[in-house]
Amino acid sequence: MPSFCRHNRLVQNCPICSKEQSIELRPIVTSSAPRTAQPRPTTPRPSRTRSGSPARSGGSSGRLTVRRVARGADDGYHSPLVIGLKSSEDAARLAEEIAFADHRLKTLEHDPPGLYAEVADAGADIEERSWLAFLIAYLCPLEVGGKGEGEVRGEGEGEVGGTEEGEGDGEDPFAEIERVRTSWASGEMPSLEGVRCGPRSAHDPARGTRTLEAYRTWAARAGSQAAAYAGDAAWPPERRFARAFERLALPGLHRDARFDLLVTLGRLGVYDMRAGSLALGGVNDVTVGAKRAFGIGDPLLLERRASDLARACGVPLEALDLGLHNWQRGERATLGLGADAEPDPEALSAICGALGL
């Protein structure tokens, strides 16, 4: 029977107990011992190629977009609210985008432009208002009258680089949504062939209308859109927002579209909901921008620092969604307000003061 020592080893393997009990220590055989046998000959294996798949090459059939992020020079700037920033230029740009996002939220509440006014019409059917809000968030208003008038997206085409020069000047940002929209009661799907989409659109031509079909199925499962969004009447606005955001994780509906949809429904008074967090995570400009600004990647700390920043700047937490998105991209998406929309000077001054600018 093999016996074990107090060191939980076989006695003959223990350098301490083998001496105490006068047992010969078993020699340790290592790879440095000389080989007595000749190495076995190896036969090269024939390379196997998967049927139906081409051999790998240096190129890629998929599209890879690399965007260089503009960063200001390190000038010694420091703020406990945005500890990831070392440049006052970056901080000033962030302040401008947060102020603009706050201005957009106020505009939605008090003077909604374009199709947003139809969504805000309390006298209209709530199902039609909800459906129109979904189409606006899914396709996104065009950026007209300035740079980036929109992208053409058609079945099987992928994204086509914008419109012709000058096209879109003076055009309604909601023109494409108005052109393809259908009513909820009709049950018809919009024809999305060749539709132009805004910068935060979730539409993928390869999916066709499958995301819209998934949305209708989601609403039908609850009985109606109103029931699906409202949930329990006793829920506070923050919980209603969070639950709807979680349940709207439909195929093809990314984080930005879901968040903007719920913000729109809340600000236009369709449902009593308000964001209690930014729902950060995944690969999107809001999350990447938050990691840059707050200097950390942990989701819980990101949410905490985002709340601290919004509170110090005197803006709703929802304003950081579009603010961080535009700041990270380096170009402003107005989402229906038009290229001439500018942030309120007093709000911008207050945000700059909070950031120590």
Image (spheres, helix red, strand yellow):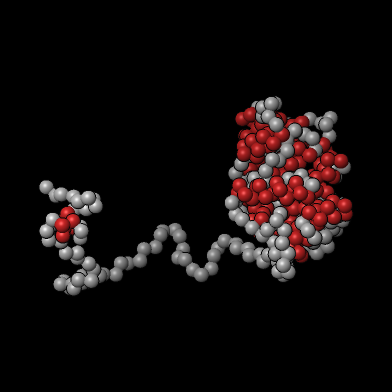
Query: Which one is nearer the viewer's eye here, 211 or 262?
Result: 262
Task: Locate residue 318, reporting x and y percent.
Answer: 74, 45
Name the residue at 82% across, 36% down.
120
Query: Which one is nearer the viewer's eye here, 317 or 191?
Result: 317
Residue 231 occupies quadrant: top right
Task: Locate residue 128, reporting x and y percent.
Answer: 76, 34
Say whether residue 289 is visible: no
Residue 147 occupies quadrant: bottom right
Give above or below for 17 relative to 122: below
Name the residue at 15% across, 49% down.
3
Q: Quadrant of the C terminus?
A: bottom right
Name the residue at 81% across, 56% down.
353
Give above or below for 148 relative to 57: above
Give left or right: position of 26 versus 342: left
Name the residue at 78% across, 54% down.
354
Give above or below for 54 relative to 309: below
